[in-house]
Amino acid sequence: MSRALSPLLSAVVLLAAAPGIRAADDDPKAIVTRAIKAHGGEEFLSSHPAARSTNKGKITIPGLGEAEFTQDIQYMLPDKLKDNLELSIAGQKITVATLMNGDKLSIEAAGKPVEITDAIKSAMKDATQMMKVARLVPLVKDKQYELSLFGEEKVEEKPAVGVRVSAKGLKDMTLFFDKGTGLLVKVEHRTVEAGTGNEINEERIVREYVKDKDGIPVPKKVIVKHDGKTFIEAEAEVTYLEKIDDSEFKK
């Protein structure tokens, strides 16, 4: 997950009592602006378009059941990603390597090329768009995005307020922000399941944030749900970066 794309649960509960914060709950742009500040500020978010994340956890694979996994992801917005995934299922280890650089996309499973289907292309397009939106700054700077108030709901038993994000030619997304901290706690959107081609409702939830060495909140515990069912449970170690050398995204 990207930095803003990762929801968070920290502790600035006193801010929720301030009259100004209550008023902001009715203004989607003010909600996002507050979240930008909570995630390190506009300057930090704009100057750190790259990240590396090492993850481990469990994933439920349709037709195969539950598997343990480890994962190393590097990405640089807007369109570069390198993902090395190792699955352990039924006593076997399977590696999946994904490389995206602009419009070039390749995937290998167990060392063999995977056909890049329309479903895979669509899923990758949705994922990269989600990472951009989760950076938050484009939502208040780029006029292509329209924001509207979605309403309130609980995320991981904590009150959150939702903002719907719309843009021409792109699928709507709803971002939920913790009412106490202002941090992003969930991203929900419709997407295509890469393996089946079926359209699903995906929720990406950060259960816990920790602060890095610079005091920036980063996701620690993350879950992903597909149509309400848990798809991934993971622990992450995330480092935000100003740049990753382009050579990392070449074969």
Image (tube, grey):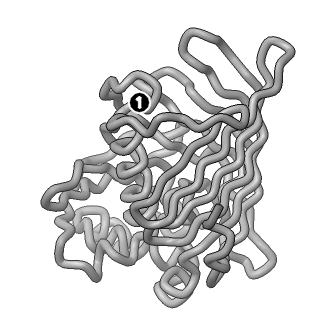
**Residue 172 at x, y percent in the picture:** 23, 49
Q: Quick one: which residue is furthest to the left in this view?
A: 168
**Residue 100 at x, y percent in the picture:** 52, 58
User: Looking at the image, which residue is at 59% across and 65% down?
Assistant: 75
Q: In this view, does 18 lie above or below 188?
A: below
- Residue at image mark 1: 193
- Per the image, label 1 sits on a secondary structure element best described as loop
Whether residue 12 appears in this view of the structure is: yes
**Residue 223 at x, y percent in the picture:** 60, 37
Whether residue 17 appears in this view of the structure is: no
Q: Toward the viewer: 142 or 71?
A: 71
User: Looking at the image, which residue is at 45% across and 59% down?
Assistant: 104
Q: Toward the viewer: 6 or 110?
A: 110
User: Looking at the image, which residue is at 39% across and 61% down?
Assistant: 103
10 Å crowding of disc 1: few (<14), some (14-19), many (20+): some
**Residue 96 at x, y percent in the picture:** 67, 38
Give the side of residue 31 with respect to residue 205, left or right.
left
Q: Is residue 246 above or below residue 190?
A: below
Give the side of residue 92 with respect to residue 138, left or right.
right
What quarter of the picture does the C terminus occupy? bottom right
Kind of residue at disc 1: Glu
What quarter of the picture does the N terminus occupy? bottom right
Q: Is residue 65 above or below residue 232?
A: above
Which corner quadrant of the image does residue 131 belong to? bottom left
Q: Toward the viewer: 198 or 101?
A: 101
Give the side of residue 84 with respect to residue 120, left or right.
right
Q: Quick one: which residue is furthest to the bottom in this view?
A: 43
User: Looking at the image, which residue is at 63% across and 82% down?
Assistant: 243
Q: Toward the viewer: 173 or 75?
A: 75
